[in-house]
Image: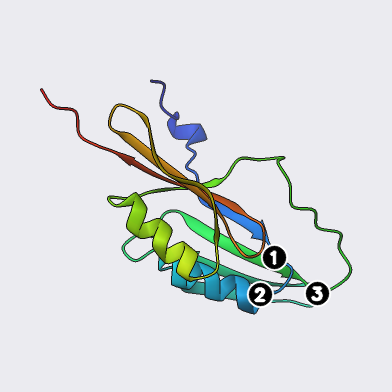
Amino acid sequence: MARNSPDHALRLAFVKLNVPSMAPALAFWQAAMGFKIVDTYDEDTFLENILSLPGEDQLHLMLVEWKGPLAITMGTGHGPVGFVTHDVEASLSRAVAAGASVELPATEVAPGLVIAKFVSPQGHEAELVHQKPKED
């Protein structure tokens, strides 16, 4: 696998979700996945909360609420936000308890690979993945 060269080093830093209303979106992602706010920008045109999972300081989920008129269409232009977990069913249950709807229940899609999909109350898709260790 090719690596970034020192003069062009890249790393994935964030996924940004536009939300129609910050308070319920923030409440969902905190309750469902355990995100914590690490920074906030309250500007004239937008409110943005930068979220991180406990122990994770490299990849962030950013929620943005635009303060002016902006047509936001949820859709299939991108895939779901993905999460790796040790317990797909427990993670899915927390998301449902926080208001998500199940798109795909916990399903073994390949030997040892379990996934589930849900939709947040704001309409964002998310996927939970667990790969069981292969036996030698």
Crowding near the residue tagged with mark 1, few <14, some 14–19, many ≥20 C-alpha atoms within 10 Å = many
Residue 67 is labelled as: 3
Q: Are marks 2 and 3 in contact (CB under 8 Å)?
A: no
Q: SS at mark 3?
A: loop
Where residue 121 appears, as percent x and y from the top left, is 62, 65
Residue 5 sits above or below residue 11 on the image: above
Q: Is residue 84 left or right of residue 104?
A: left
Residue 34 appears in the picture as rendered: yes
Taking depth in this image into account, of 93 and 26 the one nearest to the observer is 93
Q: SS at mark 2?
A: helix
- In primary-sequence order, the first of circles 2 and 3 is 2
Q: Is residue 60 left or right of residue 121?
A: left
- Seen as rendered, the residue at the extreme left is 136
Type of amino acid at the residue the image marks with label 2: Met
Where residue 107 appears, as percent x and y from the top left, is 40, 39
Type of amino acid at the residue the image marks with label 1: Val
Residue 19 is labelled as: 1
Residue visible at 48% across and 64% down in the picture: 96
Type of amino acid at the residue the image marks with label 3: Lys
Residue visible at 70% across and 41% down in the picture: 76
Q: SS at mark 1?
A: loop
Residue visible at 73% across and 46% down in the picture: 75
Where residue 53 appears, as percent x and y from the top left, is 39, 63
Residue 18 sits above or below residue 114 on the image: below
Residue 38 sits above or below residue 59 on the image: below
According to the picture, the residue beneath numbered tag 2 turns out to be: 22
Residue visible at 51% across and 67% down in the picture: 29
- In primary-sequence order, the first of circles 1 and 3 is 1
Cα–Cα gap, marks 1 and 3: 11 Å
Taking depth in this image into account, of 2 and 88 the one nearest to the observer is 88
Residue 121 is labelled as: none
